[in-house]
Amino acid sequence: MAGFDKFAESLARRLARGTSRRSSLAWLGMVATGAAAIPALPVARAATPQHGGGGAAGRVPVTSGSEQDPGDRTSCDYWRYCAIDGFLCSCCGGSVSKCPPGTEVSPITWIGTCTNPADGRAYVISYNDCCGSSSCGQCLCNRNEGDRPQVRPQANNDYNWCLGTESSIYNCSLAVIVGVATEDAG
Amino acid sequence: MMRCGLLGGAVLLGSMAGGAVLAQKPEPLPVEELSQVEALPADYPKSWVLVHDFHFNAIVDGRIAIVDTADPQAPLKGLVRAAQFANMLYAPEKREIYTSETFYSRITRGERTDAITIWDTATLQPKGEIVLPGGKRQQSVTYTGTFQFTNDHKWALVANFTPAQSVTVVDLEGRKVLGEIDLPGCTHIYPTGSRGFSSLCADGSMISLVLAADGTVASSKVIENAHDIDTQPLFGMPAMVGKTAWFVSYTGQLRGYDLSGGTARPLPGAAHVGTAEGGAPEWRPGGWQVIASDAAGLLYVLMSPNGREGSHKDGGTEVWVVDPVANRQVRRIDIGGLASSIAVTREASPALIVARPDGQIDVFSAADGSLIRKLGATAAYNPTVLTVVP
């Protein structure tokens, strides 16, 4: 973790000093979308119960249908949500990997590493925001395993990551698998 | 049917007896004046708190609630708009409130405008605005460090994040933008010296900048090893004791930075909030605005008994009072349930203001921890930052 972060920070600062804003932005986008290739990211703790939000009373559970991806995707306890902060797109007309209609997916974001209880692997999760419609208001969920202060943007979920989109209005958050953390890939 | 029959009988009886009752009625209520609007005292009493309502269910419609914590009957005195991940500053000597906001011409779409709005403390009407160029204002869940004063409240500093990081320097009195300072790798604004600020940087350093009269950087200095993100990550919002900023780490370490001169000076030695039995697995700070100070220089830290990796925003159930200079835990206050943000008023008998995740606000004695009054969930849906009247 420390090694990667130090590398990323020094690279970010160097790039930001020496290049245009657009270049910096493209670089962060690369981090998010190319996260599968990053080794030794922090392995977040397995999901623990009693997280606030999500899974409102009376809501019918939404599951993947696959034993290897267990859990209710409208519940804050779902394993992919270990570092999410916002409304779950699965409750908002979208899914864990698709934004609701009428919104636009943010190209850059923060990432977390969550352990899948079914296979024990640590997956790199990209928490892209969906943007351009007002707050969804359903299934608010905030979990912070591996979340770090804003000074480390790539590991902080307090930013509005509706950046690089036509509108910065926040609607909901995805939890997309973008890779398996190398140390647990086997 | 039975209910209808009884109701019909009552109506009949009422109309039969109507004439006699009418004769005994008191005078009708007087006609009231139309078109009245309340006003506030321009100088807010020290029991008042400005409560930032993040308004998660409609972030575009965030607001600042002006709350009298000594008035349980009518705690909400008025609202100031604080749209779309806004920030707020309060200048009591100018009788002004400033909001730093983002707007779209069609609410969720269209042309983006970032602006500082200047509000009158008595009327809560806007007095003016300063448009911020570039559409780059940092949008986050509320932090105090993204919008700050410098130069004796004459200027404001606005943090930008695109995600390239910079700071816009604004002349509040002249109603104009002075310029922009690139600050790659560094985040949040901590006013430093008479005209300047410091930021924490991702490589563990802190940078202090002195600004010239025209808003440009006159000088800067990097303080290496000022914080440790890996082992002692700091909550972003410090408590101020005079010109010293006290931060608390995710595990309870206290770090002080003297911001009185042109360059920040980390105070030697590290204090700690202390420990207690009963943690599962351990007591740690938890919540959003987790640290506050009182006029005597004591610190108040919101503590969770369920501290672990990832618990730092889960809220706390006790407030621990700590003397950071003596590195001594003074007392513990049971606040009777989960809270997310705290502040301490500057009243003669200071009050500990406790805001809870469901919007409830409770008032405790800062001196002995006793519950003074409950205000209920009467002011804000999602209270994030509490600003007391200085």
Image (cartoon, coloured by chain):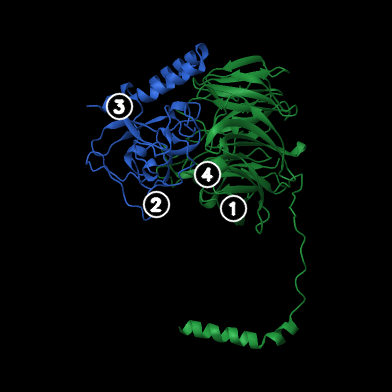
| Label 2: few (<14), some (14–19) or many (≥20) C-alpha neighbours in 10 Å | some
Give the chain letter at badge 1: B
Residue placed under numbered mark 4 in the picture: B58
Name the amino acid, label 3: Ala
Percent across and percent down for residue B231 are 45, 28
Kindly identify the residue that appears in the image at 77 percent across and 37 percent down.
B93
At 77% across and 76% down in the image, what residue appears?
B27
Q: Colour of chain B?
A: green
**Residue B186, quarter of picture:** top right
Instruction: Decide if residue B144 is on the left or right side of residue A115.
Output: right
State how far apart marks 2 and 3 are (Cα). Answer: 31 Å
- Nearer the observer: mark 4 or 3; the answer is 4
Q: Answer yes or no: are tags 2 and 3 on the same subunit.
A: yes
Q: Secondary structure at mark 4?
A: helix
Q: Amino acid at mark 2?
A: Ala
SS class, disc 2 = loop
Q: Nearer the viewer, mark 2 or mark 4?
A: 4
Q: CA distance from mark 4 to mark 1?
A: 25 Å
The residue closer to the viewer here, B28 or B364, is B28
Are circles 1 and 2 on residues that touch, CB within 8 Å?
A: no
- The answer for which chain carries disc 3 is A
Q: Nearer the viewer, mark 1 or mark 2?
A: 2
Q: Earlier in the sequence, mark 4 or mark 1?
A: 4
Tag shown at residue B362: 1
Task: Confirm or deny contact between disc 1 and disc 3 (CB under 8 A).
Answer: no
Distance of mark 2 from mark 4, alpha carbons?
Answer: 18 Å
Indicate whether B24 appears above or below B35.
Answer: below
Question: Which tag is nearer the camera, tag 1 or tag 3?
Answer: 3
Chain A visual colour: blue
Where does label 3 land, which residue?
Answer: A181
Residue under label 2? A56
